[in-house]
Image (cartoon, grey):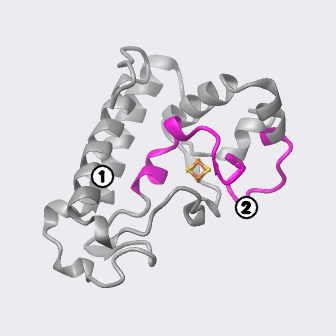
Amino acid sequence: MSTPRDHGPFRNLEALRDRVYNHAQRVLLDHAAHFACRLGCTDCCQTERTVTDVEFDALARAVAALDADTRARLAAAEGPTPCPLLLDGGCAVYDERPLICRSHGLPLVMEGQVDVCPLNFTELSILTLPDHDLLSVDTLTAVLVAVNALYCQEEGGDAHRRRPVSALFSSAD
Ligand code: SF4
């Protein structure tokens, strides 16, 4: 990625994002013909996500950096569906989107079961893919839990909670 490296509290989150990005780029290149993912498709964003403290705070930082008009439009969005960060057909904080959002569209394996967006790999079974083409959700989750635990230890967060994205716009949070 071309963004400057962050050596602050989000350094481990950014390192994990880089790993997912590099994996995604390789799989996208190797299987380009089997991906329907494109700018403007928001099927992945129709459900609100919950996130750990480290990703919540990264999202909060990104929202705070938006212009006032955009922040007001996001805050005025009603309901958790679709995701409160979906604006004008795209993610308002795309560069800071949670890891779960970064995994969408990719062939996944979770607890031994493979899965992929139904719009992708319509002519090739992901069961035929080698293991290294599958993103392990279990591993990703385990590493994120560790990253979040260290972040909470350093920054004083709560490593056991998950908050919905809509809490970014709640005065209680
Ligand atoms: S955070 Fe962004 S990418 Fe993730 S579901 Fe919401 S709008 Fe979509």
Residue occupying the point 22% across, 52% down: 26
Residue occupying the point 40% across, 55% down: 103
Q: Is residue 172 visible?
A: no
User: Residue placed farthest to the top in the image?
Assistant: 7
Circle 1 sits on which residue?
Answer: 24
Q: Is residue 2 visible?
A: yes
Q: Amino acid at mark 1?
A: Ala
Q: Is residue 39 magenta?
A: no
Give the mark count: 2
Mark 2 or mark 1: whose residue is earlier in sequence: 1
Q: Picture quarter containing residue 36?
A: bottom left
Name the residue nearer the viewer: 97 or 124.
124
Quadrant housing the C terminus: top right
Which segment did they paint magenta?
74-103
Residue 78 x, y percent position in the rendering = 84, 53
Q: Which mark is residue 81?
A: 2
What is the CA distance from the residue labelled 2 to the residue labelled 1? Answer: 26 Å
Q: Is residue 82 magenta?
A: yes
Q: Picture quarter containing residue 107?
A: bottom left
> In the rendered view, would you say 22 is above or below 118?
above
